[in-house]
Amino acid sequence: MRTSKRPQILEAAARIVEREGVKSVTFDSVAAEAGLTKGGLLYHFASREELVKAIHQHLAAQWESDLSAAAGKSAAAATPVERLTAYTRVAVQSATRAELLFMLEGSTTPDYAAPWDEVMDRWVPPPTIDSEDSAALDRFIARLAADGLWLYDSLTTEALSPELRQAVAERITGTLTREDG
């Protein structure tokens, strides 16, 4: 029985997306990046559509793994604040351009969106803002700030210094745990 090259292929495809965008994912480019023949790639994925769907699933699963590691537990075992804090930490420290590009692409195709939506549903429930609940508003603002930093990192060539990134991350996560007075 042959060892599956699926993880190697999916990682290669993610590297291509990170460098060149989603449209650059072709059988030829992924096979070359993965060190396989086009036939070897076709053994694992019968179509580009199947490959792209698998990349969405792979990246969403990695993202969820990062969220669980940041929380130190699964989404089911974490409180709402622990889940949002983990989401914020991952978004400000380790989210990738490939994830962003695939999430954007997925937003227009239900099959592609499904793995991302499942992760979001577990980790970041939709905001329910009560104008009288300032803590709920702070939590939503923290999420928006984390998402904004992720977009900044993904769309600009200006890298933040580790010190600035840490300061921003601490400020954002600090809004999630402070007591209202």
Image: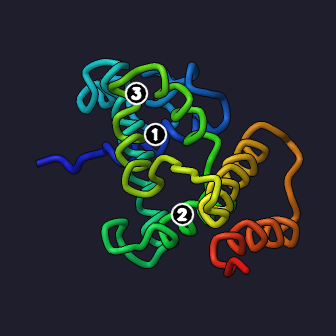
The secondary structure type at the circle numbered 3 is helix
Type of amino acid under label 3: Val
On residue 86, which mark appears? none
- The answer to whether the residues at label 2 and label 3 have Cβ atoms under 8 Å apart is no
Foreground pick, 81 / 2: 81
Q: Which of marks 3 and 1 precedes in the sequence?
A: 1
Q: Residue at x 52, y 36 (%)?
A: 33
Q: Residues within 10 Å of mark 2 (few under 14, many from 20)?
A: many
Q: Residue at x 88, y 64 (%)?
A: 161
Foreground pick, 166 / 9: 166
Type of amino acid under label 2: Leu
Kindly report the distance in space between the C-alpha atoms of the residues bearing marks 2 and 3: 28 Å
Q: Quadrant of residue 39?
A: top left
Q: Residue furthest front?
A: 132
Residue 148, compared with residue 47, is above or below; it is: below
Check the picture and name the quadrant holding the C terminus.
Answer: bottom right
Q: Position of residue 27 (x, y in %)?
A: 42, 22
The mark total stands at: 3
Q: Which residue is mark 2?
A: 84
The secondary structure type at the circle numbered 1 is helix
Q: Position of residue 94 (x, y in %)?
A: 62, 59
Q: Is residue 104 left or right of residue 27?
A: right
Q: Quadrant of residue 171?
A: bottom right
On residue 52, which mark appears? 3
Q: Residue furthest left?
A: 1
Type of amino acid under label 1: Ala
Q: Residue at x 35, y 19 (%)?
A: 49
Q: Is residue 163 left or right of residue 121?
A: right
Q: Residue at x 45, y 52 (%)?
A: 125
Q: Which residue is mark 1?
A: 34
